[in-house]
Image (spheres, rainbow, N blue to C red):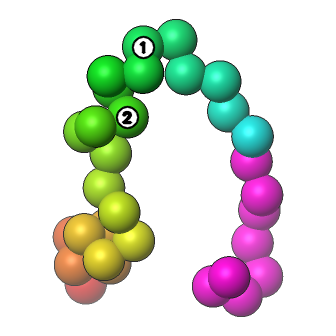
Amino acid sequence: PYGAGWMVKMTVDQPADVDSLMDAAAYEASVA
């Protein structure tokens, strides 16, 4: 949705780890 890029399918061993991932807005703010 953000232009050219990669699509990736991942399998998570520890579903609770997903809670600490950044959403698009948080990631954009961290790299700005």
Measuring 35% from the left and 63% from the top, which residue is drawn there?
23
Measuring 42% from the left and 21% from the top, which residue is drawn there?
15
In this orientation, does residue 24 appear?
yes
Question: Residue 18 vs residue 20: left or right?
Answer: right
Element carrying mark 1: loop
Amino acid carrying mark 2 in the image: Val
The correct choice, above or below, for 15 with respect to 31 in the image is above
Question: Residue 15 vs residue 5: left or right?
Answer: left
| The N terminus sits in image quarter | bottom right
Q: Residues within 10 Å of mark 1 (few under 14, many from 20)?
A: few
Q: Main secondary structure of the magenta part?
A: loop
Q: Which residues are magenta?
A: 1-8
Q: How many marks?
A: 2
Measure the alpha-carbon separation of dots 2 and 1. 8 Å
Q: Is residue 30 magenta?
A: no
Quadrant housing residue 12: top right
Do the residues bearing badges 2 and 1 touch, measured as CB atoms within 8 Å? no
Q: Residues within 10 Å of mark 2 (few under 14, many from 20)?
A: few
Q: Between residues 24 and 5, which one lies in front from this camera angle? A: 24
Measuring 37% from the left and 34% from the top, which residue is drawn there?
18
Element carrying mark 2: helix
Q: Between residues 5 and 18, which one lies in front from this camera angle? A: 18
Amino acid carrying mark 1 in the image: Gln
Measuring 77% from the left and 58% from the top, which residue is drawn there?
7
Give coordinates of residue 27: x percent, y percent: 32, 68
In this orientation, does residue 31 appear?
no
Give coordinates of residue 6: x percent, y percent: 77, 62
| The C terminus sits in image quarter | bottom left
Q: Which mark is residue 18?
A: 2
The correct choice, above or below, for 10 with respect to 23 in the image is above
Give coordinates of residue 19: x percent, y percent: 28, 37
The residue that disc 1 covers is 14
